[in-house]
Amino acid sequence: MQARTGKGDWIMDSKIMKFAKALLCALALVPMVAFANEGGPHLDSAPDRSKDQLALQHGAKIFVNYCLNCHGASSMRYNRLKDIGLTEEQIKDNLMFTADKVGDLMQTAIRRDDAKKWFGAAPPDLSVIERSRGADWLYTYLRSFYRDDTRPTGWNNVVFPNVGMPHILWELQGENVLHVEKKGEEQHQSLVLAKPGKLKPAEYDATVADLVGFLKFMGEPAAESRKTIGVFMLIAMAILSVLAYLLKKNYWKDIH
């Protein structure tokens, strides 16, 4: 055993003990966080639109017409929409309302100060919202608004209680009301369509799926290209491995 050499050793031991206690506390919180997540609202599985260009184009149209009024996508340029099959002319004629050039960023049409004044907080940028929240959360959230006269906007949300955002797609979905059923000490919440919208429920769900698909595309526009390149690289590496083995076998065939 090594003897203590001075006050510095005790200070070092104290720091180690504090670090160990902090680490144990953090580990102890992990089950609590997991429990809180498990007790959250049920999330529906979002349909995969990553390989459906028509669905992504429809999602881009919904995003520009409904979301881009308040939310920006500061990491996304209009010309990246060519990756989902749109031409430069189609982008200019149908999707560019807040920019002058195809290479411009998809900026919001609303001023940040005005948005904060009207909604209490500036709407977040949606460039990577799907990577942050997840497709299932967004898909369920956009289908879970209901009328609530106690809220400043007149809307509330089952997935995001007391949300400051109004239901921007209400004309398409219609107006839901919250129905609460008590079973003993538990409460079961469900949404009932009180006023139909322009779309039937199945059509609205498909529209939201297209929008979520586009939000996922915005988070990583090169995702499909990256996957394709990855597959070709694996094939190339497999071929090179076979050639390297045959070369090695031919080189050492006479040395045994």
Image (tube, rainbow, N blue to C red):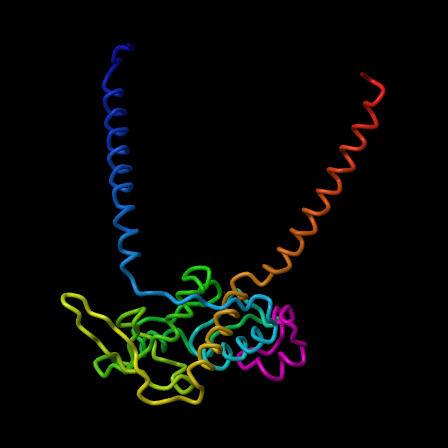
Q: Pick whichever, 36 or 87, lies toward us.
A: 36
Q: Quadrant of residue 179?
A: bottom left
Residue found 26% across the figure and 37% down from its top = 24
Above or below residue 141? Residue 62 is: below
Q: Pick whichever, 78 or 132, lies toward us.
A: 132
Quick one: quadrant of the N terminus? Answer: top left
Image: magenta residue range: 79-102
**For residue 22, side relative to residue 256 (left or right):** left
Q: Pick whichever, 83 or 93, lies toward us.
A: 83
Residue found 44% across the figure and 67% down from its top = 125
Task: Tell me where residue 39 appears, x and y as whole percent.
Answer: 27, 59
Q: Quadrant of residue 225?
A: bottom right
Name of the residue lying farthest toward the right: 254
Task: Tell me where residue 187 appears, x and y as whole percent.
Answer: 20, 69
**For residue 202, side relative to residue 250 (left or right):** left
Q: Is residue 207 magenta?
A: no
Above or below residue 16? Residue 160 is: below
Quick one: quadrant of the C terminus? Answer: top right
Name of the residue lying farthest toward the front: 183
**For residue 60, side relative to residue 3 (left or right):** right
Q: Pick whichever, 161 or 187, lies toward us.
A: 187
For the image, the number of numbered tags is: 0
Q: Quadrant of residue 110?
A: bottom left
Q: Is residue 80 magenta?
A: yes
**For residue 187, side relative to residue 246 (left or right):** left
Task: Tell me where residue 191 appears, x and y as whole percent.
Answer: 30, 78
Task: Tell me where residue 145 appears, x and y as whole percent.
Answer: 33, 77
Residue found 26% across the figure and 13% down from its top = 5
